[in-house]
Amino acid sequence: MSFKRVPQKFPATIKEVIIGAGDKTVTLGGENVLPFYSFDDKIKNPPRVGVEVSDLGPNRDLPELGKFYAGAEKIADVAKKACTIPGADFISLVLESADPNGANKSIEDCVALCKEVAAAVTLPLVIQGSKNTEKDGQLFVKIADALQGKNVLFMSAKEDNHKGIAVGAVQAYGQKIAAESAVDINLAKQLNVLITQLGIKHESIAMNVGTAAAGYGFEYVVSTMDRIKLAALTQNDDKLQMPIITPVGEQTWAVGESFKSEEEAPAGWGPRESRGIAMEVATASAALAAGSNAVILRHPASVAAVSKLIAALV
């Protein structure tokens, strides 16, 4: 008897979240199948790849990265150059210098930089904060005001600052928000519930459910994303039907495989930059297979490789 395949049908769909404006938009989510199960049904919007641009500038000690961004001295120029990377769908500006425990750049200076970058890029814009919840809460509201009409996505709103960002950036100025939790399905759902109770529509919310570099507890990330997608699709849990966006680069370039010099690394590991790209591609591929709707990567070679992978599978 020949095998007769029966497509899986689910009673639910992941919500669509659109970022960007005009002819510069990208849609996250919208699928009603498990990750890359295009044989069950057409995947409406393929997973997207973003390029991480730090306000501290690219690491020019990495030969290929430095070569790519050669001549781009201002951050706006770096972001504009990042838009030309094959496979890039959006730019993710990271305001690292806003950290009060670091450079502690003023809110006014950060807002001015965001306006400059927004004017320079040709792709939708995602903005990541300093990871200081109090500073980010203030920062995102000011940026939301300055970038009215740009429809940017703010990464990330946490339990401690979600109210201010949801009301001050999303309700007031129509921007989008990513709810950040720490690799726990219950925490992810709880934060989504709290944000929607403020009147924020599902179509304005994405999820950053946390991640790790491959090999560094990544099985917990896979388990969390897997359970979220199954609950959203099989149980029609509308509090978990938001698309997932995962900042991969910040994790993978911080592990030994990526930062150890050739003198420090064990014999046979090869050039540092190649190791970092390999870690970034491996982790991003795993995150997408687990259910992430978008990944944020740092190196142009990683962006090109992962976007080709997506095109081949969708």
Image (cartoon, grey):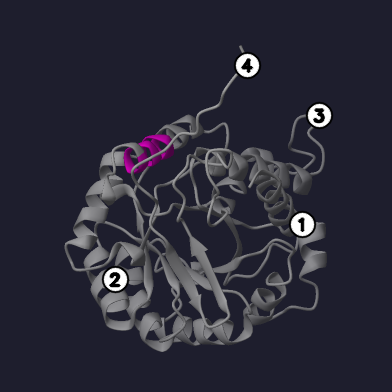
Question: Callout 3: 10 Å neighbours few (<14), some, many (20+)?
Answer: few
- Residue range highlighted in magenta: 224-233
Task: Report whether 201 appears left or right of 60.
Answer: left
Give the mark, 2 or 4, whose residue is nearer the N terminus.
Answer: 4
**Mark 3 sits on what residue?**
267
**Mark 4 sits on what residue?**
2
The answer to which quarter of the image holds residue 25 is bottom right
Give the mark, 4 or 3, whose residue is nearer the N terminus.
Answer: 4
Callout 2 amino acid: Ile
Task: Report whether 139 appears left or right of 192.
Answer: right
Q: Residue at x 68, y 78 (%)?
A: 80
Q: Is residue 259 visible?
A: no
Pick out the residue farthest to the front.
Answer: 1
Callout 4 amino acid: Ser
Secondary structure of the residue carrying tag 3 is loop
Q: Position of residue 26 (x, y in %)?
A: 54, 68
Q: Is residue 220 above or below residue 203?
A: above
Secondary structure of the residue carrying tag 2 is helix
Callout 3 amino acid: Ala
Q: Position of residue 165 (x, y in %)?
A: 29, 71
Callout 1 amino acid: Leu
Secondary structure of the residue carrying tag 4 is loop
Viewer-nearest of discs 4 and 3: 4
Rounded to the nearest whole Å, what is the CA distance between mark 4 and mark 3?
51 Å
Q: Is residue 131 visible?
A: yes
**Mark 1 sits on what residue?**
62
Q: Position of residue 228 (x, y in %)?
A: 36, 40
Question: Callout 4: 10 Å neighbours few (<14), some, many (20+)?
Answer: few
